Amino acid sequence: MGAQEEDTKSSTIGGVLPVVEVASLVEKAKFYTSLCLGSTAILAVFAFLFLIPFVVEPAISTILADFSPHAVACVVTDHVYAEGLKNCSWASCREGCTSAALRCHQIRVNYTRLMFEEFMAKPRGSIPWDMPDTKFFVNTEGCGYPPRVNCSDFAKKYGYSNMGKIFPCYYSRTNPETVVARYSWDENLRHLVLALVVPTVLFGVSLGVLCYWYCPPMGKNCGGPGRNLIDKYARKE
């Protein structure tokens, strides 16, 4: 007994931690790591549920809308600023995608399916508009949050004194009556992939490590050598 205490003291004095203390540190590290992994898995689930209505569904709707990959020519024909829930049955721009719009800008445009660069190279008035008086939206969702979406700036850019100016826009090939000011296939696909992959990977890795640490495999002996889970509860004959 005295020899063991002397060995422990000498090892501590020499700068080497005893085996018991090392094991204790490992257990503490494993506990806190497990706590972090469990929290990460839970947060990943909530993040995925949060991203479904805000990123995943709009991205899928954008893909199904099949917007033109190249900008076409648009011109604003009408701009109305309305107030009240009854008057804002639709809005070209909404700051916030979950609440009803009480104040709204309603902008309508004419557009041609000819590419914007080709249209601008032609004499003005020589090409007829393919779709007249169509609803115009700030993006594929028709809404967003500041600072990315600012409806006042959007209205100043396309309405008021800028009515009649020709600008690039994108139309839906599955629903030609939908026209948007901004669209990017690469950006939309990137947001969709990140929203699906990042939470799934974080959840899978966290859960996999926890299962590896705390869930023994079915073939591992339980209750003594030579007895697995099946043999342990098997009926004796």
Image (cartoon, rainbow, N blue to C red):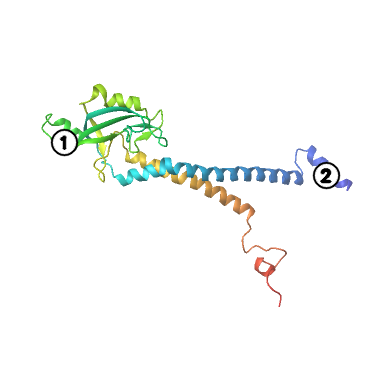
Question: Which image quarter holds the C terminus?
Answer: bottom right
Towards the viewer: 6 or 56: 56
On residue 160, the disc is none
Q: Position of residue 9 (x, y in %)?
A: 83, 40
Towards the viewer: 24 or 59: 59
Q: Residue at x 22, y 25 (%)?
A: 163
Residue farthest toward the top in the current orientation of the protein: 161
Establish if 135 lies above or below 154.
below
On residue 7, the disc is 2
Q: Residue at x 26, y 44 (%)?
A: 175
Which sits earlier in the primary sequence, circle 2 or circle 1?
Answer: 2
- From mark 2 to mark 1, how far is it between C-alphas? 93 Å
Q: Position of residue 142 (x, y in %)?
A: 34, 36
Q: Position of residue 116 (x, y in %)?
A: 20, 34
Describe the element under mark 2 as helix, strand or loop.
Answer: helix
Judge from the rendering whether residue 194 lies leftward or rightward of residue 154; answer left or right.
right
Label 2 CA crowd tier, 10 Å (few <14, some 14–19, many 20+): few
Q: Residue at x 24, y 32 (%)?
A: 108
On residue 129, the disc is 1
Of marks 2 and 1, the one in the foreground: 1
Judge from the rendering whether residue 194 lies leftward or rightward of residue 114; answer left or right.
right
Q: Amino acid at mark 2?
A: Asp
Q: Residue at x 44, y 44 (%)?
A: 52
Label 1 CA crowd tier, 10 Å (few <14, some 14–19, many 20+): some
Q: Amino acid at mark 1?
A: Trp
Towards the viewer: 79 or 109: 79
Judge from the rendering whether residue 5 lies leftward or rightward of residue 67; answer left or right.
right
